[in-house]
Image: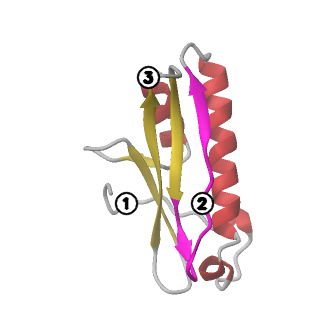
Amino acid sequence: MKDAIVAGFALHGWRKDRLVDAFSKIFETAVAPKQASIWLSFDKECDRWWLANGDFTSAGENVLAGTYAIFPVGMSQASIEQTVAALVGEMERKIAKAYSVRLLGYSAENVSKTSELGDL
């Protein structure tokens, strides 16, 4: 299941860190390219995976605060892909509305830039 989540993020240009269960992607801002991230963890008590603790801070505001997705064990591949796509879409819309990104004057669909700078 974890591999399916990782693959889903990769399809959207988000890279998994080599050492920890975190995903990142670089976005252009008016100041300099900035990294967004979100963490994956397993909750044994409830038998599910969580994506939470997103971070993309602009003008002192973390626009990804409170962003999360839940993946119950046994979730179908199609449901995992849909959940990842919805989460990525939500995160990238929030990033597009961040002050440092809005200063660029780009439309929301032209904001993201796939990271070629390596992992976290």
**Residue flagged by tag 2: what amino acid is it?**
Leu
Image side of residue 48 versus residue 19, left or right:
right
Judged from this view, the residue extending furthest toward the right is 107
As measured in the structure, the alpha-carbon distance from the residue carrying label 3 to the one carrying label 1 is 34 Å
Q: Residue at x 58, y 63 (%)?
A: 112
Label drawn at residue 44: 3
Figure check: 17 above or below 109 = above
Query: Which residue in the structure is indicated by mark 1?
Result: 116
Image side of residue 114 versus residue 85, left or right:
left
**Percent coordinates x, y for residue 67 in the rendering:** 62, 51
Figure check: 80 above or below 27 = above
Q: Nearer the viewer, residue 10 or 42?
A: 42
Figure check: 20 above or below 5 = below
Q: Nearer the viewer, mark 3 or mark 2?
A: 3
Label drawn at residue 64: 2
Image side of residue 70 versus residue 89, left or right:
left
Q: Are marks 1 and 2 in contact (CB under 8 Å)?
A: no
Q: Which residues are magenta?
A: 55-72
Q: Are marks 3 and 2 in contact (CB under 8 Å)?
A: no
**Residue flagged by tag 1: what amino acid is it?**
Glu
Q: Residue at x 60, y 33 (%)?
A: 70
* Numbered disc 2: secondary structure: loop
Characterize the local packing of mark 1: few (<14), some (14-19) or many (20 or more) Cα atoms within 10 angstroms: few
Q: Please check the rendered image and state whether residue 97 is part of the magenta-colored stretch, yes or no.
A: no
